[in-house]
Amino acid sequence: MSEELVGRFFAALEDGDIAALREIYAPDAVIWHNDDLIEQPVDENLKVLQGLHRAVSGLHYEIIRRVPAPDGVLQQHVLRGRLRGGAEVELHAAMYLQV
């Protein structure tokens, strides 16, 4: 179930389907980013993701590895896309998704 839900989550991210993401997130979910150490509630995170889709076209996640964890999934990926000016985006990241 966890891996299926995580697959749906990343498909919704790639599609920019904010309604599906809202449905997948637990209402009290907290999204923490290691770059700014801020914990975001769901509504703030969804605004960021909407902005990401406005700024980056062809957004997709190249999954390097996805490993089941006792209460979720660990994933390493490369976020790829293209900025409006044509520059390629390539962001290497890892995520822990608690399900």
Image (spheres, grey):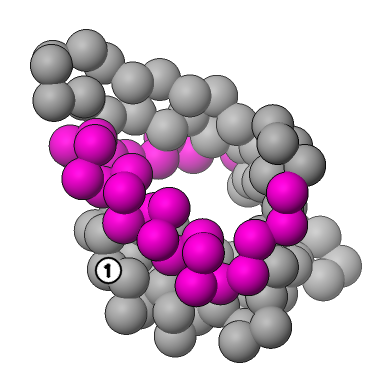
Q: Measured from the top left, where is residue 63 in percent x and y?
A: 49, 38
Q: Position of residue 25 (x, y in %)?
A: 55, 78
Q: How many marks?
A: 1
| Residue pictured at 33% horizontal, 21% vertical | 89
Q: Secondary structure at mark 1?
A: loop
Q: Is residue 23 left or right of residue 36?
A: left
Identified at 40% across, 20% down, the residue is 90
Where the N terminus falls, by quadrant?
bottom right
The extreme right residue here reads 70
Task: Pinpoint residue 98: horizontal percent, then vertical percent.
Answer: 74, 67
Q: Which residue is mark 1?
A: 17
**Does residue 92 sit above or below 37 in this rendering?**
above
| Quadrant in which the C terminus is drawn | bottom right
- Magenta range: 38-65
Amino acid type for the residue under numbered disc 1: Asp
Question: Where 91 falls versus 97 (above or below)?
Answer: above
Extreme top residue here? 87
Query: Residue 77's x, y, as percent?
Result: 53, 34
Compared with 99, 50 (above or below) is: above
Q: Residue at x 26, y 29 (%)?
A: 81
Magenta run includes residue 46: yes
Seen from the viewer's position, the closer of residues 62 and 21 is 21
Q: Residues within 10 Å of mark 1 (few under 14, many from 20)?
A: some
